[in-house]
Amino acid sequence: MRSVETVLFLVVLATVVATSARRLRIPAPSLLVVAGLVVGVLPGVPPITVTPELVSLVVLPPLLYAAGEETSWRDLRAVWRPVTVLAVGLVLASAAAVGLVAALVAPLPASMAFVLGAVLASTDPVAVTALGRRLSLPPRVQVLVQAESLFNDATSLVLFRLAVSAAVAGGAVSFASTGGQFLLLAGGGVGVGLLVALGIVLIRRRTVDPVLETVIALVSPYAAYVLAESLHSSGVTAVVVASVVLGTQAHRMTTAHIRLQVDAVYSTVIFILESVVFSLIGLQLPELIRALAGTDPDWPWQALLITLALIAVRFLWVFPLGWVMQLRQGSRKVNWRMSTVVSWAGARGVVPLAAVLSIPIAADDGTPVPQRNLVLALATTVIVITLVVQGFTLAPLVRRAGVARTPAESRRERTVAELHLAEASLAHLEHLADLEAAPDAVLERLRQNLRARIEHTNHEHGEAPQSPSAAAVYRSLRRELLSVETAELTRLYEAGTIDDGTRRRLQRTIDLESARLDDL
């Protein structure tokens, strides 16, 4: 099967499986991994080799960009302390625990065991975001696990580079060099991300062509990633920082019509990339297992023990952190439900896969890297286990723990926000009426429309005015009122009355109406 045919087959398979997952209300990444495993063991299926360039350069930047853009800056500021503890402390503890267990249970030299620990130390933003979309977690918990997965890359990447240097090149490790590499990776990534975000904001504010806007949006994550990597800093951190900044500026950079088009195109691209990459994770494992045939029959138990160690150290780290956070809030009782959910939401995925695939085949002296195939197989198996086991059980755990937001709570929050928006528009309309800034007939029609929205908490519109001049005035005033509603929506979000999910849904509703007015 040629490469093009393989890619097309994966796209079709992933689309069918992901669509089935939505209908069955189960996590698409978990089902995609299972489907990839099933296809990989079928007779006649050609070997699937995933290159690190395919994952890290082609697939990873847009997926990270989409995950970062969904992150609320307001909520991120509220959880930066626990995120910092998890992104640095938990990564170091996880790498040490996995490295120790791997050295004890697997035939790995200490240097390669540490490489495996560094690979699996950080949670994966793509997997965590994809698994968390349907969980209805409280905003604070959702942003905590998502932000942790987004910002723990710099720590794990420093560890990985140090481990590879010690295992492959025999390089010396010192605290000074470690600190310098961390500053270069994290600080450089943040700087590049901010620089790219600033440039994109300036460009997009001067662009009115929807096609160009879409192209710029698609190129943005690659620009941040490539520039950061060329400067030997963290491309992942650069993409995350750029996406978070641009996500806060999205409604200021472009028109509603362009935002809707860009969102539609980007959602399609993300759906395809997510579907294919999780299928590839499943497809990769059978080939790695065949490469180990006859060399180490105990690798499944080794992978299981490493997975248990990874989960255990996360529980042992998250529960004390949760207790400290409760103490800061004046409560001595540990919220075990939240801590359990956060502990279990630690799936590995695309980023660890890209890291383990980038391990060199040969050392600097030309000798083969010891036990590279075993490290690849163990890491991929752990990734598959976390995606399948934690992916399928996370939603039931959230429901059993009782921490999920109920549909009634979400509807109530949206209803309150809709009423605030309609009341803000009505108040502005009365101000225009006092100024006699528009014909009474147009003002009365808008007034009736807004009163109907307040009464029924929906968007009910009457017939369009018959007079062309009245129609123009109506559209102009309606756009002005939509601007007022956008400002009120921003105020409600910044005041903490609504969460980021509600703000995005209502902003999309406003954008749809604005686009409809443009087409009249």
Image (spheres, rainbow, N blue to C red):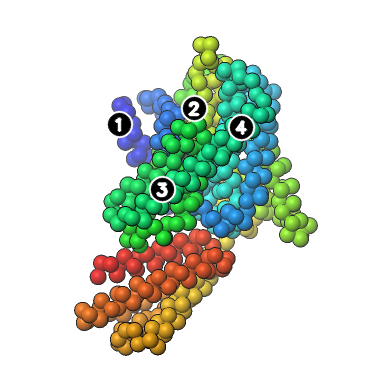
**Residue carrying label 3:** 199
* Residue 4, disc: 1
Q: Distance of mark 3 from mark 1, alpha carbons?
A: 35 Å
Q: Distance of mark 3 from mark 4, alpha carbons?
A: 27 Å
Type of amino acid at the residue the image marks with label 4: Gly
Q: Nearer the viewer, mark 1 or mark 4?
A: 4
- Quadrant for the N terminus in the image: top left
Which residue is at a point 42% across and 57% down the rendered structure image? 250
Q: Distance of mark 2 from mark 1, alpha carbons?
A: 22 Å
> Of marks 4 and 2, which one's residue comes earlier in the chain?
4
Give left or right: position of 138 versus 205: right
Q: Nearer the viewer, residue 495 or 48?
A: 495
Q: Is residue 79 above or below residue 513?
A: above
Type of amino acid at the residue the image marks with label 3: Gly
**Residue carrying label 4:** 180
Classify 10 Å Cα crowding around label 3: few (below 14), some (14-19), many (20 and above): few
Q: Nearer the viewer, mark 2 or mark 1?
A: 2
SS for callout 3 = helix
